[in-house]
Amino acid sequence: MILSDTKILAEIEKGTIVIQPYDRHCLGSNSYDIHLGSTLATYKDHILDAKRHNEIETFQIPDEGFVLYPHVFYLGVTMEYTETHAHIPFLEGKSSTGRLGIDIHATAGKGDVGFCGNWTLEISVKQPVRIYKGMPIGQLIYFPVDGEIEVKYNQKQNAKYSGQPNVPVESMMWKNKF
C-alpha cells in the first residue's frame, strides 16, 4: 500500500517523514516531487573497479543549465534532504523526466527505514538533454512497514550512506568484504 497525500502530511506532522525544504505544492495525491540539486559528479576513471574506491569529480550546474550526454554516467543529488523513520521510501522518476530520456536511478530506487540525507541520483540519458538545478527530477513514494524494525538504517554500524550530504556520493562497494 502506498501512502496517500493526507497520510504523508500526517506523517510529516508526526516527524516520521522529514522533507527539507518542504513545499506543499510538491505534494501529489500519493507522492512528493523532488528536485535536482546544484551539484553533479562523474567518475575520474573510465574503468571502475568494484574492489577499490572509485573517486569522483564534482561540479556545479550553471544557471544556463548543463547538457548531459549518452554513454556518460552522472551522479546527481536531490535538493531535498529527507528522513524516513517509519516507512520505506521509494524514489522514482517523473513521467516528464522519463519523456526527456532521463533515467534518475540505475538500481537504487529504494531507501531504508531510517535513511537520513539527500538522495544520490544515478543519471543516464538516451540523447543529449539540457538539465537545470532545481528542476523537478523525481518523486518519493512511501510504503508502510509490516512489523517492527530491529535496527534502522541510521543506527547501523556499517551504514555506508547514512547522513548523505547535499553533494553526490560515489559507490562505497569497496567497503564490502568479498
Image: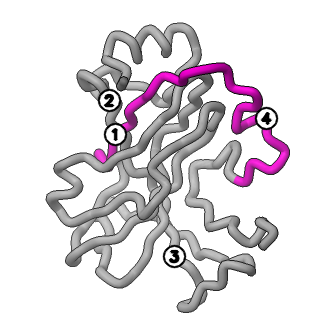
Residue 62 within the segment the image draws in magenta: no
Residue 54 sits in quarter: bottom right
Instruction: Read off the magenta span.
Output: 135-160
* Element on which disc 2 rests: loop
Q: In the rendered structure, which disc, 3 or 2, sits on the residue that comes first in sequence?
A: 2
Question: Badge 3: how crowded within 10 Å, few (<14), some, or many (20+)?
Answer: some
Give the residue number, with chain letter if any, for mark 1. Answer: 139
Residue that sits furthest to the front in the current view: 147
**Where does residue 79 sit, x and y in percent of width and height?**
46, 44
**Where does residue 103 sit, x and y in percent of width and height?**
31, 62
**Where does residue 53 sit, x and y in percent of width and height?**
73, 76
Amino acid type indicated by mark 4: Gln
Q: In the rendered structure, which disc, 1 or 3, sits on the residue that comes first in sequence?
A: 3
Amino acid type indicated by mark 2: Ser
How far apart in space, not on screen, are marks 1 and 3 (Cα)? Answer: 23 Å
Q: In the rendered structure, which disc, 2 or 4, sits on the residue that comes first in sequence?
A: 2
Q: Residue at x 48, y 35 (%)?
A: 89
Is label 1 in contact with label 2 (beta carbons under 8 Å)? Answer: yes
Give the residue number, with chain letter if any, for mark 3. Answer: 42
How far apart in space, not on screen, are marks 2 and 4 (Cα)? Answer: 26 Å
